[in-house]
Amino acid sequence: MNMTLDELIIELILQDLKHNQLILGLDRLNLDAGYSHYLGILDLTQKLMGIPEEFIDDFSTTYMRYMQRCLEFPITRSGEELRELAVECYENLSAMMVR
């Protein structure tokens, strides 16, 4: 199955949301997982979307706002409950480029 670039970016965002559920959940338990497990998906997403330098700060702020919302969703093995949030994140990030 071939993925479009949009589908790939949404899947990467979904995986980052799942990862952040784990990291933030461990932090809440005072098991400092913190920044030692940074995957770099934000940077990869910026590159794949071709974000110009002048939008990077706004892009990063928006992206991280969605990463914080991951704890509003149940933690499951598949992470499919996060897909709608990943799509919303992608659409919001894409809209930044139109402005």
Image (cartoon, rainbow, N blue to C red):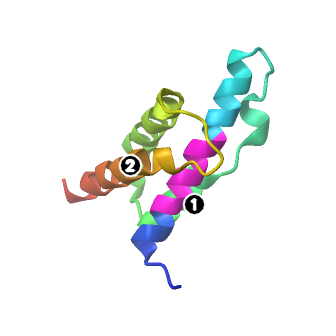
Name the residue beneath numbered marker 2: 84
Disc 1 versus disc 2: distance between alpha carbons? Answer: 20 Å
Give neighbour class at mark 1: few <14, some 14-19, many 20+ (Cα, 10 Å): few
Check residue 71 in the rendering and tell me which mark sits there, or answer none: none
Residue 33: percent from left, percent from top:
78, 29
Name the residue beneath numbered marker 1: 44
Which amino acid is tagged 2? Answer: Glu
Q: Which stretch appears magenta? A: 10-19
Point out the frontmost of discs 1 and 2. 2
Residue occupying the point 65% across, 52% down:
40
Q: Nearer the viewer, residue 7 or 34?
A: 7
Prevalent SS, magenta region: helix
Which amino acid is tagged 1? Answer: Leu
Residue 42: percent from left, percent from top:
55, 50
Residue occupying the point 40% across, 69% down:
6
Write down the quadrant of residue 26 in the picture. top right
Residue 50: percent from left, percent from top:
42, 66
Residue 88 position (above or below residue 26) = below
Residue occupying the point 76% across, 41% down:
37
Q: Earlier in the sequence, mark 1 or mark 2?
A: 1
Secondary element at tag 2: helix
Residue 12 position (above or below residue 18) = below
**Residue 12 within the segment the image draws in magenta:** yes
Secondary element at tag 1: helix
* CB atoms of marks 1 and 2 within 8 Å: no
